[in-house]
Amino acid sequence: MGVEVRVEGLTKSFGGHPVWADVSLTLPAGEISVLLGPSGTGKSVFLKTLIGLLRPDRGSIWIGDRDLPRLSERDLYEVRRLFGVLFQDGALFGSMNLYDNVAFPLREHTRKSESEVRAIVQEKLDMVGLTGAEDKLPGQISGGMRKRAGLARALVLDPEIVLFDEPDSGLDPVRTAYINQLIIDLNQQTDATFLIVTHDINTARTVPDNIGLLYHKHLAMFGPREMLLSSEEPVVRQFLNALRQGPIGMAEEKDADELEAEAASGVELPPLPPIPPQLQPSDGGQRRAERPAGEWCRDNGVTPPPGSFAGEAVASGRHAADTHDFGRGSVYRSEVGS
Ligand SMILES: Nc1ncnc2c1ncn2[C@@H]1O[C@H](COP(=O)(O)OP(=O)(O)OP(=O)(O)O)[C@@H](O)[C@H]1O
């Protein structure tokens, strides 16, 4: 079972230049969260700070009663074992085959016998669909396979928190769809707490339980997926819908003249697109963290964008027979139409 990570007032700068300041958020135990933000807003720095590779200027990272930035090197080493990290390029050793790459953390950090190591490595390779590829070298396989091998290695010590640094970078849309499905399935199987840094809007819209957006040196918003996908907040709306209109410009923030010109031009923002269904585990089961479609909007009195949840009863076989859920979708459709 994953653990909650509570970040309070986290601030990081390099040479007096702030990357971000006063970031506070909670990664709920066992849930999938996505962190978005324009290039250079410090998403990778945030991941590195979470695992203690970078020290923040101020603030706390609570895991249970332990505040990571305040731990001694020795205690930090212990806490790091709670984390599994999928680095952008998989960070595999080029001279080792996949088996030895995945076995590496077990041989390095545990005293397991080679037969125990073998059982665990086979299990993890199977989880990511790489059974049979044990003898391949990283250079002999595709980028998508390298990501999956990196993921098997990130999971080998049964982490409670898994960090993904751009799991979709360099992948084509089909491979990205596969890796997204794998992330959902692994979350179902492990119940670990997942944090994904990505630029892929489709991933952000369909995979996570929560979304956060870093912008202009602070956390613009963090919350349940439906909250951000129904938000009218300009920067959230612009980013999650990949629009040119809004406060984010080519170099990060538009200046006052650009914004004024945009307002004067009378360009109307397109309406918010429907909230798409969240990806479901491929075995037809349920993730522990999963919430019924539309629940957040309903509980918070938010009318979702027109067309939201309309396909839910069809998209997920599980809900098809659930007339209550289907009824809820219908209510939204009629509310929206009225
Ligand atoms: N070790 C470091 N020393 C000094 N500056 C750094 C260091 N690491 C990162 N930075 C700076 O911090 C800022 C944020 O970088 P980071 O790589 O975290 O952004 P990002 O949001 O992950 O970007 P991208 O989406 O392009 O990957 C950048 O301006 C970068 O140059």
Image (spheres, helix red, strand yellow):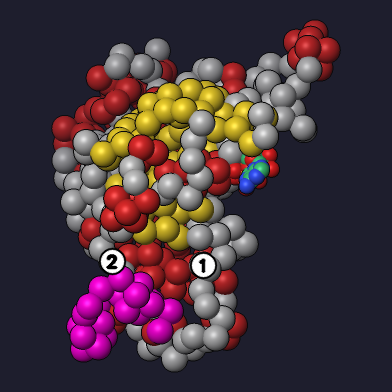
In the image, what residue occupies the spot 29% across and 17% down? 300
Circle 2: residue type: Leu
Range of magenta residues: 100-120
Circle 1: residue type: Gly
Dot placed on the residue nearer the N-terminal end, 2 or 1: 1
Looking at the image, is 307 positioned above or below residue 287?
A: above
Residue 207 pos. (x, y %) = 40, 47
- Classified by dominant secondary structure, the portion drawn in magenta counts as helix
Judging from the image, what secondary structure is the residue with disc 2 in?
A: loop
Q: In this view, does 301 lie to the left or right of 134?
A: left
Residue 180 pos. (x, y %) = 43, 56
Please state which of residues 49 and 155 is positioned toward the viewer in this rendering.
Answer: 49
The circle drawn on residue 157 is 2
Q: Distance between the residues labelled 2 and 1?
A: 16 Å
Which residue does the numbered mark 1 point to in the structure image? 90
In the image, what residue occupies the spot 44% across and 73% down? 149
Ligand 1, image quadrant it occupies:
top right
- For the C terminus, the image quarter is top left
Residue 292 pos. (x, y %) = 24, 36
Residue 75 pos. (x, y %) = 29, 50
Tell me the quarter of the picture where residue 88 sits.
bottom right
Magenta-colored stretch includes residue 109: yes
For disc 2, the neighbor class at 10 Å (few under 14, some 14 to 19, many from 20) is some
Magenta-colored stretch includes residue 144: no
Q: In this view, does 158 lie to the left or right of 267?
A: left
Q: Is residue 173 visible?
A: no
Number of disc labels: 2
Residue at the extreme bottom: 135
Judging from the image, what secondary structure is the residue with disc 1 in?
A: loop
Q: Which of pointers 2 and 1 indicates the residue nearer the eye?
A: 2
